[in-house]
Amino acid sequence: MHMSDALLSPQVGVAMWTVSAGTIAYCSRKIRNELDDRKVPLMGVLGAVIFAAQMINFTIPITGSSGHLGGGLILAILLGPYAAFLTIASVPVVQALFFADGGLLALGCNIFNLGFFPAFIAYPFIYKKISGAKPTPTKRSVASMAAAVIALQLGALGVVLETVASGIASLPFSSFVILMQPIHLAIGIVEGLVTAAMVSFVYKAKPEILQSALEARPIGHEPVKNVVLAFLVMALLAGGILSWFASKDPDGLEWSIARVTGMEELKGTGEGLHGSLAAFQERLSFLPDYSFRKPGEVKPGGGGNKSPQAAMETKTEEKKSAGSRLGTSVAGTVGGLLTLAVVFISGFLLKKRVQSA
Amino acid sequence: MRYIDGAVRDFKDLDLLATGETTIHRLDARAKVVVTLVFILSVLSFGKYEVAALFPFFIYPAVMMALGNLPAGYIAKKIVFVIPFVLAVAIFNPLVDGQLMIQLGPFGITGGWVSCASIIIRSILTVGAAIILVSLTGFTGICRALEQLGMPQAFAVQLLFLYRYIFVLTEEGGRASRARELRSCGKKGLSLASYTSLVSHLLLRTWERAERIHIAMLARGFTGEFHTIHPKRFGGKEISFVIAWSAIFIFIRLQDIPQLIGTTVMRMIS
């Protein structure tokens, strides 16, 4: 199961989308310029093979539970890193749209976690280094095993970091890591076993596939280095943007909206009805017992006249102090239920009208 | 095995829905892709303790399902299927975050439960939006839209190829898997060894098939891109669709509408 949108913050989602989109663009250019176009249909069909293989389960030795192939590493071994990355990247797109497996905003994260590590870290730096120029079956098995384990560990760590950076799930970093890494160690070992067995099978049955993958790849050390470098730059940029948002307020979009709307508009709206969310929430926080706000208790627009920055500062303080800015007061609950009712009734009526028309 | 059959059926069902002929179906795919992304971003930009403020966003799936004539029960079922997986992480929120947030008479609700509820609402909304997008647009339409919006062509071709072959290969993999299960009399035959040889055979057969297909495509003049007629264009309808929905999303993002309604109602009562 991939990461879903619900646990992701927009900042992390957009940052990872940028990183993955950049890598996809780079790989697409590489494939166009350097590789023969024979690989294009091959990639599509191999993606479908991975899809099919993921649906066939097998019994994991000793434990008796069932597992399936992830597929990132075997693709990198067969196709080389660029084509493999594009192929792996296409699988979560289909899964997100048809099986709701992983969200649309989370696609950036999922593509990165599943594709980047096997194609650009595990394959060039682990698999190729261990298997060497003249791979023996033992070397190949050891290499696949090590590469699969490391790719999965990095992928799992990616999931943890992205989730913790989003801050929607409360699970602290250390416990999340303790939960995720051992499970993915087991999955990585299984993936390594399957990959090693498949590589040796393919080698026996059709050695020219592996050979051609090794030879037809005009990929020296530099391009892979370029990718890693580019990734580092993108990660730094993304991290910079993230920390810039984080330092102001955990909710960066709110902050930027408040900045865009500016002070003038806030001053103009005394009632706060059309004011910014920040001002609105500040007013709500005057309700100490989360019950219905008595009219006249707060002067209208009391918070609306503040500059957005000041409003944000008070807000961050409030967040620390017992999270008082909740919109889940009694009034909020009543209003929420009413909203839901209105929405569903209007949808229902609309549907009736559409059908009768 | 049932999983494979179910997966293939999922594809076919959603593809069938996408062939609908409503106003929404006829809109240019780019408009729907953009609106879906704006929707997801606005939903996710809420703080982690927002619950009621998210409710107005249900207007989008409700209206789209109504206008697009989509079966609500079917889409609800697909959403419900995904929630346990989100809950697997969200359930730690109540355990970790025990700070009291709301006092409703004798019952205290902790921040963890509130944020857990918020996560579930988020996943219903975002998963719903994704399913609605694909059942109103179809996979090919989405790919074309993404390509027009700047996705590299090689990746678009990859997605379209993948999509075309998924049907063929899942069915083939399903048959092989069924044959293995029938011959394995229980669990013993489902070993790693038989799995790898099965999947490897699938791989080799597919590899050869892909080469044959590619030669056939070259013979028919394939130059690396799919040519399709584009009867749809990004016109006035699409512009107003995008602007209207985005305006609604930003409005409900900035105004806590349930709070406003609730306050008004309570004021009238008291």
Image (spheres, grey):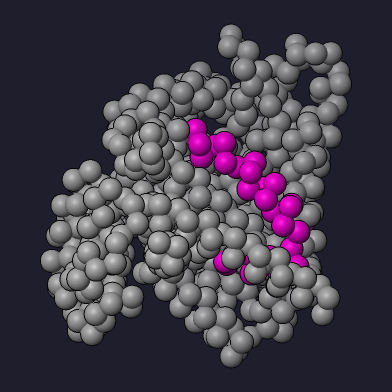
State the residue at coordinates (58%, 11%): A63
Q: Can residue A274 be seen from the camera position used here?
A: yes
x, y (%) of residue B194?
72, 20
Q: On the picture, is B160 further left or further right than A106?
A: right
A314 lies left or right of A252: left
| Rendered residue at 48%/52% (across/down) | B122
Q: Residue at x 80, y 13 (%)?
A: B186
| Residue A149 visible in rendering | no
Q: Is residue B77 magenta?
A: yes
The overriding secondary structure of the stretch rendered in magenta is helix
Asked if the stretch drawn in magenta spans residue A264, the answer is: no
> Where residue A334 appears, x then y in whole percent?
47, 56
Which span of residues is magenta-colored?
Answer: B59-88
Q: Residue at x 83, y 28 (%)?
A: B178
In terms of image quadrants, where is residue B110? top left
Decide: is A197 above or below A343.
above
Residue B107 vertical position relative to residue A228 in the rendered view, above or below: above
Q: Position of residue A8 (x, y in %)?
A: 40, 49
Q: How many marks?
A: 0
In this view, the residue farthest toward the top is A62
Quadrant in which residue B58 is drawn? bottom right
A136 or B14, nearer to the observer: B14
In the rendered image of this protein, does residue B107 appear above or below residue B193? below
**Which is more toward the observer, A258 or B172?**
A258
Judging depth in this view, the residue of B81 and A176 nearest the camera is B81
Placement of A51 over or under B196, stated as above or below? below
View extreme (front): residue: B270
Task: Quadrant for the N terminus of chain A, please.
Answer: top right
Going by the picture, which residue comes out furthest to the bottom?
A: B236
